[in-house]
Amino acid sequence: MLEATNISYAHRKFSILEGIDISVNNGELLVIVGPNGAGKSTLLSLLANEFGKTEKPVFFKKKTFKQWDDKELAHNKAKFSQSNNSDIPLSVNDVVMMGRYPYFQSVPHKEDLDAVQKAMQETDVAALKERDYNSLSGGEKQRVHLARVMCQLDNDVQSKLVFLDEPLNNLDVLHQHRILHTVKDFTEKGNTAVMVLHDLNLAAQFADRVMLLKKGKIVAHDVPDKVFTKEIISRVYNFPCTICPNPVNQNPLIIFGI
């Protein structure tokens, strides 16, 4: 689904990423974790083709992004960014409808309206659809943009890809889990998700594979119980921890400060 080899990136001669190899399969949820400044969001943006031409190509479905038609690419790939415009003079429904712009010229079709409604229900913002976007709380705005991104990929295309940069910011516990279950349902249908998270326990619970970065390099890239060990986590985060089985699914449960 997604593949890149020996990816490096520097800004003003300051190295941000160095020698990153990545391969993500259909139906997989890859979660990228690491301390502040590890290069997580930079890697996600680079993989999503937001930096334009790169020294080493990124392959999506065995094609470089340059080989994709823009409209076709929008039907196959979407990205949720960590920062979104906080001043949008539109209703919630209209903001979510932006995700369907690749599908119609001026008037949305029934399938567009249905996709918007479905996405708003999944992200629990359907009751807010007539509200002015600017009147919402930070967490509500976050969920509106998540709905916008997810409805963009509501189509008949096989093996779609979504990038999510810290999608759980400003969300309470209920909505964190609700969003993660929505993403997991998306991947279980044969699609792929690459997500940046700070919460290691949520990463351990939901990820199929985890990539742990530190200072722009891969420390570990494997299934959660191979990445989240006491030795690796304590060393990378420079903070003591202990690991015990999560009673929900036996995946690692990380307790810091012990």
Image: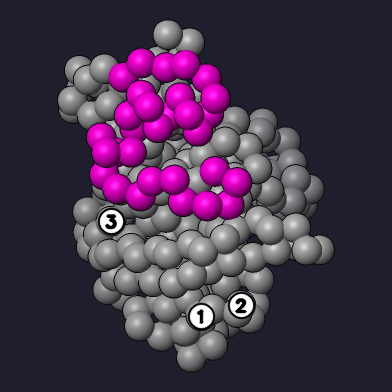
The kind of residue tagged 3 is Glu
Q: CA distance from mark 3 to mark 1?
A: 21 Å
User: From what the image shows, is residue 6 above or below residue 200?
Assistant: below
- Residue 143: % across, % down: 53, 41
Q: Considering the image in quadrants, where does the C terminus appear?
A: top left
Mark 3, residues whose alpha carbon is within 10 Å: few (<14), some, or many (≥20)?
Answer: many
Q: Is residue 236 magenta?
A: yes
User: From what the image shows, is residue 52 above or below residue 14?
Assistant: below
Q: Nearer the viewer, mark 3 or mark 1?
A: 1
Whether tag 2 and tag 1 are in contact, CB under 8 A, the answer is yes
Report the span colored magenta.
214-243
* First in residue order: circle 2 vs circle 3: 3
| Residue reaching furthest to the top | 258
Element type at mark 1: loop
- Residue 131: % across, % down: 64, 41
Please say whether residue 35 is visible from this viewpoint.
Answer: yes
Please say whether residue 97 is visible from this viewpoint.
Answer: no
Q: Which residue is mark 1?
A: 57
- Residue 167: % across, % down: 52, 43
At horizontal 41% and vertical 25% (from top left) the residue drawn is 174
Q: Which residue is mark 2?
A: 54
Q: Is residue 97 magenta?
A: no
User: From what the image shows, is residue 84 above or below residue 114?
Assistant: above
Mark 1, residues whose alpha carbon is within 10 Å: few (<14), some, or many (≥20)?
Answer: some
Towards the viewer: 132 or 141? 141
Q: CA distance from mark 2 to mark 1?
A: 6 Å
At horizontal 27% and vertical 38% (from top left) the residue drawn is 226
Q: Which residue is mark 3?
A: 28
Q: CA distance from mark 2 to mark 3?
A: 25 Å
At horizontal 29% and vertical 33% (from top left) the residue drawn is 205
Mark 2, residues whose alpha carbon is within 10 Å: few (<14), some, or many (≥20)?
Answer: some
